[in-house]
Amino acid sequence: MEVSMNSESASASFKSRTRPRFRFRWSDQISAYLFLAPALIIFAVFAWFPIVKTVIFSFQNVSLNGTSTFVGFNNFERMLIDPAFTVAWRNSILFATLSIAMGFLIPIIVSIMVNEMRLAQGFFRLVYFLPTVIPITVTLLIWRLIYKPDNNGFLNAALALIGGHPQSWLQDPLLVRESIIVLLTWANFGSTLLIYLAALQDVPSEHYEAAEIEGANPFQRIVYITFPSLYPTMITTFILQVIAVVQIFTEPFLLTKGGPGNATLTPVLVIYNKAFLNNDFGLASAWSLSLIIILGLFSAVYLRITRRAD
Amino acid sequence: MESWNRGVISPLELRTAFGRYTYILFIVLLLILAVTVLFPFLFAFAAGLKTSTDIIKGGLQIFPQVPLWSNYSDVWTKYNFIRLFANTVAVVIGGLICQLAVTTLAAYSLARLKPIGGRIILGGFMITLMIPAIAYIVPLYTTLVNVPILNVSLLNNYWGLWLPYSINAFGILIMKTFFESIPNDLYDAAKVDGASSVRIFWSITLPLSRSILIVLTIVGFLALWKDFLLPSLVMTKPDMQPITVRLWYMLNGSTVVSPLNVQMAASFLALLPPLLIAIALQRNLQRGLNVGGVKG
């Protein structure tokens, strides 16, 4: 059987020179789909099916033993009148704003400085990247000690050295979001840094040379040449950062449980609570659907921009 | 670096006082940042050497006067740490094998075998990049509790993690692009010689893709080792939980209340494997992140 298939495919590739398109042969298609089968099955069961189920669940009163009834828009009504809806999305916006304000410029500036190094570029890349590999539970253990309130915490002890008062980093509603964003920036800026370093490799040296001859000093060169060259990368990392922050879950879940006073309650945390604490899968799915729609909008913007850049 | 593109400061300028001071300023700033970034690692290691009272007392003293190395050995005896490590390794290695198999097979088909509707299928895979798993975690969980058609529960079963971990649309995209870059002539020659699709995939395509497969493996290893939410939902039996999940339960003291210093020692040991892998394989990793960095 193999022999006949081989002669077929040999003649097919010969024929393809004369008639390249719209060839169709069952044997080829069967092997193509056999190769695809594992992915199709797994994506269907563990991604596409759950995504469709999110939509269906959101119109249902779901119970885990299998008896589900359609309740129309009831779940969405309950979601919208729940004060948590405004709180969680407002927190998302606050988190996103803070993370952009505190963390957006860091990888850009650091990448420019690292790119300047004649030696040890690899060392700096590696060091800054290392926090991204730490398991979140370990990160949490470490930072909980650093952020300990009163005089005992490391950060407060350090603050006392320069004459500051001890702060309740994770218990003060006015500080807790900033504290979490500092942790997130520490944990993640290393991977964004690598994106910028790759982008910096594409800045032609001739541009710098020309500017130098024109008499521009290094900082002018950064402002007039480096920044504009990084502009497309900045837009994509901006959107990716917002998309990532909208999904914040593990840090508030493990560190603050959404508190103090709902200051770190995020949409995904609400989904988790409604589903796994209250067993209200329908309401949780309505929340999920709103999250999918918002993330979808950002992704669409992202795709439009990256397509245009190509 | 192999192809170092010049930075802002030119070699000539570096000899002037202004250029040199700017350069030194950059080095100092980068070193300060490096110390800040590495500090929590040191902090965790040192806390694992303290007594629990010392940890709670906290303060600026990072290293204890008398290091308690016994904490690190207590981890192994008190926690059945070997079991926890074995669980994590089982989750990560199994997940990686499934992920690589599913990803390369699908990418090969899409790149080379031209299935009808391939573009639509690729689009279907890519949807999972736009909608992250966290957005459909609830129905994913109910699916794992009762897998359709088979009607089995995958809770407390390694397949309950391996199968969802096999979803890697980004890997499919990267591998597909790579497979398409392999010259057609190689495939034509193999076909003329009578090689089947499976043979071409196994003996020609995969060996040629070794470097990119290594990158996918490292990135996958790091991602699976640190995953938390899914394993915490799927693995509810303490003796099956991977290390990251188990640490969290210990921390909250729901079952075992363990001394804080041993917890710190345990958590430092838990971050060592990914840390060492990242350091040892940094070259491969950095190349890979340049390819895959846009994923964010």
Image (cartoon, coloured by chain):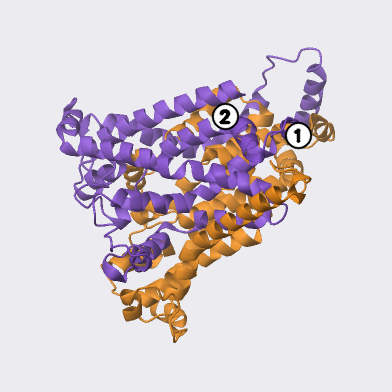
Point 42% across, 50% down: residue: A184
Disc number placed over residue A221 in the picture, else none: none
Q: Which of A51 and A200 is in front in this view?
A: A200
- In the image, what residue type sits under mark 2? Pro
Q: Which of A281 and B279 is in front in this view?
A: B279
Res A128 seen here: yes
Q: Residues within 10 Å of mark 1 (few under 14, many from 20)?
A: some
Vertical comparison of B190 with A165: above or below: above
Q: Nearer the viewer, residue A79 or A86?
A: A86
Visual hue assigned to chain B: orange
User: Foreground mark, 1 or 2?
Assistant: 1
Visual hue assigned to chain A: purple
Chain letter for mark 1, please: A
Disc number placed over residue A209 in the picture, else none: 1
Q: How crowded is mark 2: few (under 14 residues within 10 Å), some or many (20 or more)?
A: some
Disc number placed over residue A232 in the picture, else none: 2
Q: Are marks 1 and 2 on the same chain?
A: yes
Mark toward the start of the polypeptide (1 vs 2): 1
Point 46% across, 53% down: residue: A186
Spot occupied by residue A89 in the image (x, y as percentages of width and height): 27, 36
Provide the secondary structure element on which disc 2 rests.
helix
- In the image, what residue type sits under mark 1? Glu
Provide the secondary structure element on which disc 1 rests.
helix
Chain letter for mark 2, please: A
Spot occupied by residue A123 in the image (x, y as percentages of width and height): 65, 58
Point 59% across, 37% down: residue: B172
Res B155 seen here: no
Calculate the distance from the C-alpha at mark 1 to the C-alpha at mark 2. 22 Å
Spot occupied by residue A124 in the image (x, y as percentages of width and height): 62, 55
A40 lies left or right of A97: right
